[in-house]
Image (cartoon, rainbow, N blue to C red):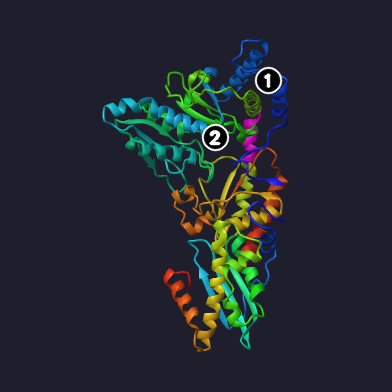
Amino acid sequence: MIYLDHAATTPVAKEVLKAMEPYFSQMYGNASSLHSPGQEARKAMEEARESVAKLINADPDEIVFTSGGTESDNLAINGAGFHVFARFRKEGKKPHIITSRIEHPAILETCRHLEGIGFEVTYLKVDKEGMVDPKELEKAIKKTTILASIMHANNEIGTIEPIGEIAKVCRKHLVLFHTDAVQTFGKLPIDVKKLGIDLLSASGHKLYGPKGVGCLYVRRGVKLAPQAHGGGHEKGIRSGTENIAGIVGFGKACELAMGDMKKESSRLENLRKRLVREVLKMPNSRLNGHPTKRLPGNANFTFDFIEGESLLLRLDSRGIAASTGSACSTKKLAPSHVLTAIGLKVEETHGSLRLTLGRQTKGKDIDFTIKAIREEVEALRKMSPLKR
Amino acid sequence: MANGLYSERVMKHFRKPHNLGKMKDPDGVGKIGNRRCGDVMWIYIRVKANRIADIRFQTLGCAAAIASSSILTDMAKGKSLEGAIKITSKGLAGELGGLPPVKLHCSVLAADALAEAIYDYYKRRKKPVPKGLQKRHDTLKERGESH
């Protein structure tokens, strides 16, 4: 199988699996226990915390372990929101949050939920390449704005947002800035101090770590209302016995990413450029997202006169795993909110195909994929009654 | 091989569709669906002695749409026009070993496309259109599904 869906998830690296193994039935202690097995677990967890923090130039005590990207996003938005909600309500005001139309559902649905209970949310438009304009964001800020959340890079079209500029705008107006960095964590250099980020979400399984673990970076001094009440784990923000094996795996994955990030991202970028160049030689095909400011391993195409789901399944039969933003591939039969936000017509979203490259993608895989896409798109266009 | 979403029969018809491609000088053509909602199906028929002597299709759509078109052509071939009109979406889905609930509309499109092709045949030959078929055509026109 040529796996080209690394934005969905990645395989656990063998070094990661090896690091995790002892923490299931040999070193199974609860990190809250005072005895040696407990302290052994705590030590492993704190070492992992250091590796995670180091990757984004944070301090270890600014890392809160969670169950993954979705929980981190919820914790950031709800945590910041409910920290001020009671005070705002007393004053008869609605806390205001700014986000974009192309955020992950973990952000958008959380915001919609908050709107329903008395928050105000602005969903910023993006340009046709998926870029958020920091000036537009600044214009949207009002006295009641408490938080802005803009993703570092989009999971579908790969566009990298100007989060440094956005963070500056937020700081100037004393608005908290959160970024969902699930797609960039361990793939692009991030320096939370230099960039001026207050909150940042990351997930383990997108960088060759296990599923079910992630973190929220919380800048020292930023106050969040706890979202899981209980024994006071993770500085009281996120109670619950820590997933030690997962956390150890996440830490190991960060260590590995730190070592090969630079080399790997330029390797992926070269492979992606070749893929895009060759695929776009086909007539009636386009690249979605920004041509250069995009995730190194992300390519997102639109092919006219075909259905993305059919292309995906035909590629799957040839041993290539890809993804599509076509409505036909979803339970709700709704087209991708990202593709429609960048101005694609509904009929254009049907023919979309996303390929996301990763560590095990080789040059020969890309050559095979280029050939397969050409042949399968051609075959499907031959089936189509519409003009070619 | 079945995949998580689709039955083995759907995948078989999707991978190797039967009666695929345009027909030269057909006796009737049914054009159904629109690109906005997703699927576009064209069904071509050749009629001899009131029977569907040959049938072909062209479809732009998902695996369920392509498989529904393909199974439709298998089921319709050789049938009398009266018999062919009676092919239902339920019958198509059944022959395919079932379709996921969100994909049932694909089988509806296929059954409607055949009805439209037969309607087109009656019109071309200036023959009286059966009442039920006329009504079905009018409804499809109204909904903007027929072209």
Going by the numbered disc 1, the residue's amino acid type is Tyr
Q: Which residue is disc 1 drawn over?
A: A28
Q: Quadrant of residue A32?
A: top right
Residue at point 69%, 42% (across, down): A361
Q: Say the numbered circle drawn on residue A182.
A: 2
B13 to B130, vertically: above or below:
above
- The answer to whether residue A385 of the structure is visible from this angle is no
A208 to B102, vertically: above or below:
above
- Residue B105 shown left or right of residue A16 in the figure: left
Going by the numbered disc 2, the residue's amino acid type is Val
Task: State which quarter of the image contains the C terminus of chain A.
Answer: bottom right
State the residue lying farthest toward the left: A92
| Residue nearer the viewer, B107 or A384 | B107
Image location of residue B104, percent across then percent down = 56, 61
Report the magenta stretch's main SS: helix
Q: Give the range drawn in magenta.
A: A258-268
> Is disc 1 in the same subunit as disc 2?
yes
